[in-house]
Image: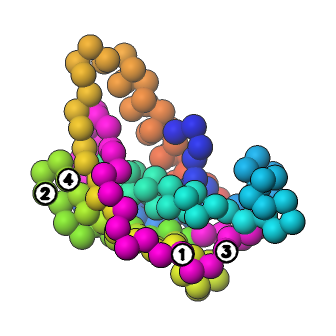
Amino acid sequence: MKFLQLSSIEQLEPGRWIEATQTLRGDEEYLRDHFPRFPVMPGVLMLEGLFQAASFLVRATRQHQPGLVLLQAAKNVKFGDFVAPGQTLKIRVDVVKEDGDSFIVKGQGTKDGSVAVAGRLVLACEPTDPDCEVAVALARREVRQIMERLQNAAME
C-alpha cells in the first residue's frame, strides 16, 4: 500500500471486527491543497482508511491467503465531521456477511466521539495469477510487516 491510511491496529478478531486508528499528521502532502487555510483529511481518504482496515480484517479472516482484496462497492457512505492535523480517526469495521470470497462490512470512523465517516463496503477476494508467484510472495510479506508494525504501534 503506497498510501497507508492507518497508524495502528488496536484490536482484531478475525471473522468479526477490527479497530484501528489514523492520526492525521500536519506534514501530509495532500494537506497543502486540501485546503491551504483549513487543512482537513479528504473524505475519500477517510473512506480509504475504512477500506484498509476492512482489507486487513478480511486477510486475517482468510489466514493471509494469497490474492487481492478489492473494493466492489461503497454504500450509504456519510460524512459527518472533519479530521484536522493532530486529530485521530478511530475506525471500527464489523463483518456483516461473509459469503465465500465476498464480504459485506459496516465501518465507522469517529473523532472525539463524533462520527466523521460511516458506510457499508462490499469487498471481494480474487486469487492471483500463478505466474505472479514472486510478486504475490513479496506483497504478502509486505502486508504482514505492515500489520505487525501497526499492531506494535498500538502497544507502544
Residue that badge 1 annotates: 79
Mark number, residue 102: 4
Of the two numbered discs 2 and 1 in the rendering, the one whose residue sits closer to the viewer? 1
Q: Nearer the viewer, residue 96 or 57?
A: 96
Comes first in the chain, label 3 or label 2: 3
Mark 2 residue type: Asp
Question: In the image, is 38 to the left or to the right of 135?
Answer: right
Where on the picture, by quarter, is residue 77? bottom left
Residues in magenta? 60-89
Q: Is residue 3 visible?
A: yes
Q: Is residue 13 visible?
A: no
Question: In the image, is 69 to the left or to the right of 146?
Answer: left
Give how far across and how far down residue 151 sits, in percent.
Answer: 52, 54
Mark number, residue 99: 2
For label 3, the crowd category at 10 Å Cα-Cα, with few meaning under 14, some 14 to 19 and many 20 or more, is: some
Residue that badge 3 annotates: 82
Of the two numbered discs 1 and 4 in the rendering, the one whose residue sits closer to the viewer? 1
User: In whole angstroms, how far apart are the C-alphas of marks 1 and 4?
Assistant: 25 Å
Circle 3: element type: loop
Mark 3 residue type: Phe
Where on the picture, by quarter, is residue 126? top left
User: In whole angstroms, how far apart are the C-alphas of marks 3 and 4?
Assistant: 31 Å
Give how far across and how far down residue 145 sits, in percent.
Answer: 50, 38
User: In whole angstroms, how far apart are the C-alphas of marks 1 and 3?
Assistant: 8 Å
Comes first in the chain, label 2 or label 1: 1
Give how far across and how far down residue 95 sits, in percent.
Answer: 27, 66
Mark 4 residue type: Ser
Kindly identify the residue that appears in the image at 60 percent across and 69 percent down: 89
Question: Does the magenta-highlighted stretch encompass residue 116?
Answer: no
Question: Does the magenta-highlighted stretch encompass residue 80?
Answer: yes
Give the answer, above or below, for where 123 lies relative to 146. below
